[in-house]
Image: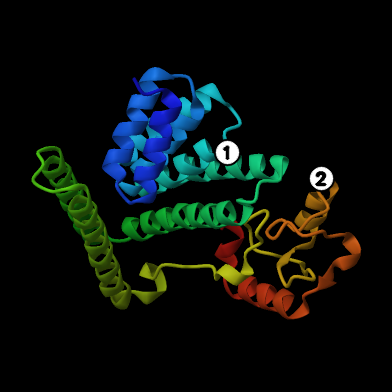
Amino acid sequence: MATSYALKEQGNTAFRAGEFKTAEELYSKAIQKDPSNPALFTNRAFTRIKLLSWDAVIDDCIKAIEFQPENMKGYYYLAQAQIALRHPNEALNSAMTAYGICLKTHDSSTSNISNLILQAKKEKWEAKERERIRRRSDLLRELEDSLTRNSDRQMWEAEQKIKQLELDETEGKEEKEEIKASSQRKLEELRSIFALSDPENLKQREVPDYLIDNISFAIMHDPVVTRTGNSYDRSTLLEHLKRSNTDPLTREPLTRDDLRPNLALKQACAEFLEENGWAVDW
């Protein structure tokens, strides 16, 4: 009879081959034999991300974190699922926790998690923006709700097709991705149409990525540039250097003496904030 370790290795092999449903089944069998191993839950969670089974991803991540509270992968995968399920506030908290564990353990995933935090923060801001715009237009709100309900229904129907074996895992994943992409295109087109009718109030406001600090994930006020060409807000980078003498993204050695003012970026940040006062709450 196969051991938990053997089943995990078989699951890894299936995962690398792109056979995600098979990998999920093998990890599940491994968990039955070793139900308190957090690595098995994060392996299955990653597989379920590939299958777009977001609720199941969350279940696995919570179990992994229960067994290992500082489980970086658990929080990282949890944040991805929460973003997919349109829970940006929770996703931001999970991603920030993963980021903190990364810094503490000097894990090499810092850059990927930084990108995920920025994505979660954008999703959080965009949700606030959508609500602000929706409050100004009852018709827009009703149409958005209708599109969202239709997308949710189609996703549920796709899940049923997979369970009833009408679609294999690859076809099911492709159908769910197409439903998501189509829904997003329709929502963006709808918002663009309404924005044309009232550009002052219905246009969605955005902050350019290059103005965002990759430590605090806020707009920079006094940006400095490192030897590797990465820019950070001076205050947050100096706080980081008290804990670790490395570049937060590249993990290369870094000291205070290596920092240089990024005057062009500082001017760009100041000009953006002067013209977009709302951005201080980003």
Foreground mark, 1 or 2, reads: 1
Is 229 positioned to the left or the right of 144 in the image?
right
Determine whether 232 is above or below 13 in the image: below
Q: Is residue 60 visible?
A: no
Q: Which quarter of the rendered picture does the N terminus lie within? A: top left
Asked whether the beta carbons under mark 1 and mark 2 sit within 8 Å of each other, the answer is no
Residue 55 image point, x, y percent: 32, 36
Q: Which mark is residue 133?
A: none
Determine whether 245 is above or below 3 in the image: below
Residue density around tag 2, few if under 14, some if 14–19, many if 20 or more, within 10 Å: few
Q: Which quarter of the rendered picture does the C terminus lie within? A: bottom right
**What residue is rendered at 33% in x and 55% in y?**
135
Q: Amino acid at mark 1?
A: Met
Coloring scheme of the render? rainbow
Determine whether 6 is above or below 178 in the image: above
Residue 150 image point, x, y percent: 15, 52
Residue 103 image point, x, y percent: 70, 45
Q: Quadrant of residue 139?
A: bottom left
The secondary element bearing badge 2 is classed as: helix
Residue 9 image point, x, y percent: 43, 36
Q: Please name the residue that numbered disc 2 is placed on.
A: 243
**What residue is rendered at 49% in x and 52% in y?**
120
Is 24 positioned to the left or the right of 152 in the image?
right
The secondary element bearing badge 1 is classed as: helix
**What residue is rendered at 82% in x and 73% in y?**
261
Q: Please name the residue that numbered disc 1 is placed on.
A: 72
**What residue is rendered at 61% in x and 31% in y?**
70
Nearest the eye: 276 or 26:
26
Nearest the eye: 96 or 279:
96
First of labels 1, 2 by sequence position: 1
Q: Amino acid at mark 2?
A: Arg
Is 21 positioned to the left or the right of 13 in the image?
left
